[in-house]
Amino acid sequence: MSLATALALITLGAMPVPAEPWHVTPGARHFGPSLVRRAAARYTDFDRYGFARYRDFPMVGDERGDRSEIERVMVGTFPLTIGQPTIITREFPVGDPWLTMTLNLRGELNSVAGPTGTVVADAPTPLWALALTTDLDKDVIEPSVSSRALYRYAQVEQGTAGELVAPTLVASTVTPFNAVVQLLFADPRMLVPEDSLLDTRRYNNITLTVTTGTITDIVTSPVNVTLQNVFLDLEITRLSPRVPLPLDVVKVLPFIKRYAAITPAADTILQLDRVPTLALKRHLILTTSGSTAGVPFTGTGSNAILDTLRISSNRRDHFGSAVGGISRRVLQGDNKFDYSLETWPAGWYVADFVLDKSLLSSLATGDLSVLQSIHVYQGGLPGTPQLSTLWAGVQKLRGLKAA
């Protein structure tokens, strides 16, 4: 058998392939994206050499096969209670896999004569904290993740920032503000984005909790200013297949959590989670000045705090090396190239373990006894400095056997 023939047979699945870890979607003969591979397995015959009989694939306009329509569904508009959580669950149209959830968070500032105060950085995003949970796989977004962090994470994923209209103080005027935050279940930066759809057929209920803060979360020391008419406009993008997809099409679920804020320079090491069912994709860091003590993702983004970043375990250095961490200047330069952003936001850094767009490269944490994010700071720090962190990864679906 020639080398070319052997490679062709391996590619089409006619020869054995190595077993794959849990966080990879094993497709039928590894033919294209996961949904296409599943369709190939169910509706396509293979000849004696393992080559597909392509005439059996459904053609454009054909009703056969795993054909899916991508639908945008408006869930509704919901009033948000200032200073309280708002729970949304019964309104969700479950029963199909979801690609994204888009939240337009909006409100108004009502100013009378002589309003004073300072609008905070990235306003109005610090006004809200989000959580998304299910009854089976539990947290997709752990409780109280700042919408500021989720807004920036979506910017990293999409290569562009969502709409952000900051509040303004204008005497005797009602001024609107809004922020568009997108939650991505399918990862657009991966080779097979559909590996991590949110398959709502698995759940009896999905719960989104939006906690709205108070006016001091977006305007410091407000005088003659009030917050009013705070709403959420909610939309999902989903797949609506003509033929029901197999329940094991999706192998992993996105997972996002934030850690407690760190005050430099007393603390330089953060102990990261080590869980057998979790793998780390991206680690986001925000360094700020003028922060609210103990409240993560507050303050003005500053490049004058972090000097180097290193992520290490008992096995090896996963980000950085024995020489030391990655320089802040080099890291932000890499981030700008990696995510195609013309202007990189001050104070933000990303350690990305899946730059090759493969879940095989995500950092599995369950077999590690130590996993640390190590921060070295600059000298002459600005006032009230703070470091906030967000962990974005994938988790194994409950009740699903490893392939």
Image (tube, rainbow, N blue to C red):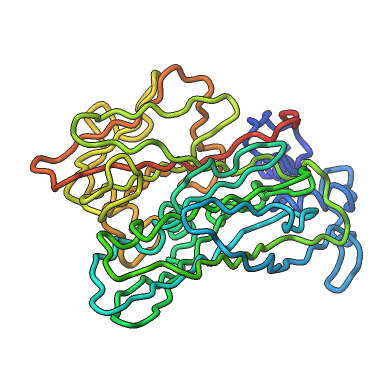
Residue at 25%, 43% in the rendered image: 386
The vertical placement of 120 against 384, above or below, is below
Give percent across and percent down for residue 27.
74, 43
Q: Quadrant of the C terminus?
A: top right
Query: Is 204 on the left or on the right of 125, as rendered?
Result: right
Name of the residue lying farthest toward the left? 380
Residue 45 appears anywhere in the view: yes
Name of the residue lying farthest toward the bottom? 172
Residue at 72%, 36% in the rendered image: 136
Residue 2 appears anywhere in the view: no
> Number of labelled discs?
0
In the image, 306 versus 30, the foreground residue is 306
Query: Is 160 on the left or on the right of 290, as rendered?
Result: right
In the image, 47 versus 167, the foreground residue is 167
Residue 221 image-quadrant placement: bottom left
The vertical placement of 106 against 376, above or below, is below
In the image, 364 versus 385, the foreground residue is 385
Give percent across and percent down for residue 16.
74, 31
Give percent across and percent down for residue 166.
36, 70
Q: Quadrant of the N terminus?
A: top right
Query: Is 111 on the left or on the right of 401, as rendered?
Result: left
Residue at 83%, 72% in the rendered image: 60
The vertical placement of 280 against 65, above or below, is above
Give percent across and percent down for residue 45.
90, 50
Query: Is 354 on the left or on the right of 237, as rendered?
Result: left
In the image, 119 versus 314, the foreground residue is 119
Residue at 73%, 48% in the rendered image: 199
